Image (tube, rainbow, N blue to C red):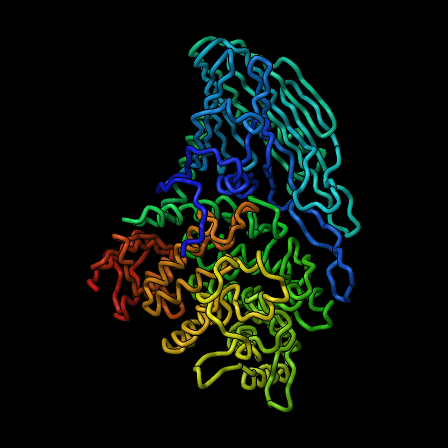
Amino acid sequence: MKMYKRLFEIDPWKIKTQTFDRENKRLMESLTAIGNGYMGMRGMFEEHYTGDSHAGIYLAGIWFPDKTRVGWWKNGYPDYFGKVINATNFIAVDILVDGLLVDIGQDASLMQDFYLELDMKSGLLTRSFVYETQEATVKFTFQRFLSIVTKELSLQKISVEVLRGTPELKFISRLEGNVHNEDANYEEVFWEERSQGFVGDTGFVTNRTITNPFDVPQFSVTCAMANQVSGAALQEETVGPLNVAASFTVPTRLQEVITLEKQVAVVTSRDLPEEEQVAQAQAILAANADKDFAQHLQEQTAAWEKRWQQADVEIKGADDAQQGIRFNLFQLFATYYGEDERLNVGPKGFTGEKYGGATYWDTEACIVPMYLSVTPPSVTRKLLEYRHQQLPEAFINAQRQGLAGALYPMVTFTGIECHNEWEITFEEIHRNGAITHAIYNYTTYTGDTSYLYNEGMEVIVAVARFWADRVHFSKRQQAYMIHGVTGPNEYENNINNNWYTNYTARWLLSYALENLPQANAEIVAKLQVTAAEKAHWQEIIEKMYLPKDDELGIFVQHDTFLDKDLTPVAEMDQSQRPINQHWSWDRILRSCYIKQADVLQGLYFYNDAFTLEEKRRNFDFYEPLTVHESSLSALVHSILAAELSYEEKAVEMYQRTARLDLDNYNNDTEDGLHITSMSGGWLSIVHGFAGMRTTDGLSFKPFCPKDWQGYSFMINYQERLIEVVVDHDSVTLSLKAGPALALKLYHQEVVLKDTVSMVY
């Protein structure tokens, strides 16, 4: 049963449509979002638009602590919920044709030949339409991108071609600081006026976040704009609270093309004090004044090409699959490319406000395994360092629960927990495992132990101490247990002995004991792990309770899971899906339905610890009960299905993860893209279809889906660049850079010196 909504045409490199879907404009805006790691925006219109829309521009690291509001306060609650806040709308340009404000939301009958396109090779967003009044007909073309060459720069070009008549055009280019959040409580405004005005022809607006009672610094942001209009000079400057506008009036001739090029520089207090921001923004504009839009676009395209050369996945014979994987890669790189170790990857990136724009465990679970292969090692290293920098706050989070060690936050900007749902914030503690498992992934993949034996060991021991305090000993069972948790399946709360959580705690304690002897002597001395402490950890490892059912041959998700009505998803009334949009929370909690991989998450993370038959029995039991209503679900199922030779299921789950947003599977993409799950398509192909593993050296066991002609990808592995090409008959590995490498191909030892091919 197909459960998707597809707005855009299938194209290997573009997201495009010739249909203006007013009813689904928010969804269109999400799918045409752009970013450059420093800032990003939804695909809203530049010109005035009357109608439902979610205009949003977001800046990396700029957020606000919104007071936690609950009816019944419990000790340990975080003081605030961190949220990304909508920033100055710096792309706004009002357009008038013979005095008539262009607004296709107000009167769509004046518009024809609509076209919208996001070019993933360059990050260029293009939109055009023909606009016809009684006196004139003009064609508008809007182009914009956010520079990955100069991170503070936004580039726009609006072209107006006169097809009939000689209309008078007026452009009013704006910086609009009076913006609101979609998720504001009680119509709150998060920005206060600081200064605005013009220096020469350059307009600027400086805003600052309002005061807060939580000692979180106020952020200030300055946007400065330079406008060039063909055939016209600046006519009028308007300055108002939180706003400036520059107006240009242009007489036209038939067949003439009038252009407005707008450059905006955005600087923030994360990098510069407020008093220096206007001068810096003007300096950035001045340094780029000699290059027009076309020149900037040429540089932008070349910079993106370098990224694509290392990261692109080519799929032959399946254009929808091809479009999906490239869309995922594009949006991930538009969100984060490791330039700033203070930043991380938010679940919505720059595409919406849901989930607050903060960092979750998604980064370590999903982003790290992909970024290790497609970016320089320093990019992933910065993600690890991000967590180490926030270790002091993780100690505070544990202390607030009366526990030893470190509890990393479920949601954070600075390391302090800022999520206010108890059953998630303080019960979904398995995220401590994902954060430390990323250290293991980095070490085994890169072969670099320098982080593990230094900063990483501080993190590992801190988390080990948390687990050792969070368990309790059951005298009746003579086993250590963990009660009152939420596993990865958030459709069950406050359960006891979640298998994945218990296994993760045991794994981490083992990993700590295994690596402490090799750690930096100064770090070991600083940590002061006693012999008694090590003995206690070992006892927990040996006596950890891991629920299982011998008759079914499965690991049991938690103590009472098998007591539920285990009706498969296929037998549900499909009109009730997604269940989170149709059922009460009470009904969901009582059901057997699994939001995302839970036990199976463990089989993916700790893959080499289980036999193929164990994986098969658990997959066969749990997948039919899974509704995949988390964006993180499909990728795990695709990888395991591929390993089990369930090709049809593997491809189905690939399509779901790679095209989750493009096809709006969960009916929620209008709120923003699912950025942190966008590694899922790549992981499904590389870890799934190609069977790549790196736990004990590099190995592959590829197959080609029957409906594809073939696929290829590149990986960066231990100072080598390797290309993998797979079709229905053979696999070819080519060493593009670096020294020879011994690896396994279908369990056979081979040495990769240049090219190795094998028929399978």
Q: Quadrant of the C terminus?
A: bottom left
Q: Residue at x 52, y 29 (%)?
A: 155
- Count of numbered tags: 0
Q: Locate residue 54, reporting x and y percent.
A: 60, 39
Residue 519 picture quarter: bottom right
Residue 439 visible at all: yes
Q: Quadrant of the N terminus?
A: bottom left
Using residue 331 as the reference point, say whether residue 101 is left or right of it.
right
> Is 552 or 547 nearer to us in this picture?
552
Quarter assignment of residue 369: bottom left
Please give the name of the residue rendered at 63% of the width and 46% of the height, measured from the top-left corner. Answer: 61
State which quadrant residue 429 falls in.
Answer: bottom right
**Horizontal relation, residue 527 to residue 253: left or right:** right
Residue nearest the viewer, comparing 454 with 647: 647
Residue 523 visible, this angle? no
Residue 627 versus residue 143: which sits nearer the camera?
627
- Residue lying at the far right in this picture: please name it: 213
Question: With respect to residue 536, does 95 lie above or below?
Answer: above
Residue occupying image coordinates x 65% and y 74%: 484
Residue 138 vertical placement versus 125 (above, below)? above
**Residue at left 49%, top 42%?**
31
Image location (x, y in percent) of residue 466: 64, 73
Q: Position of residue 380 (x, y in %)?
A: 49, 56
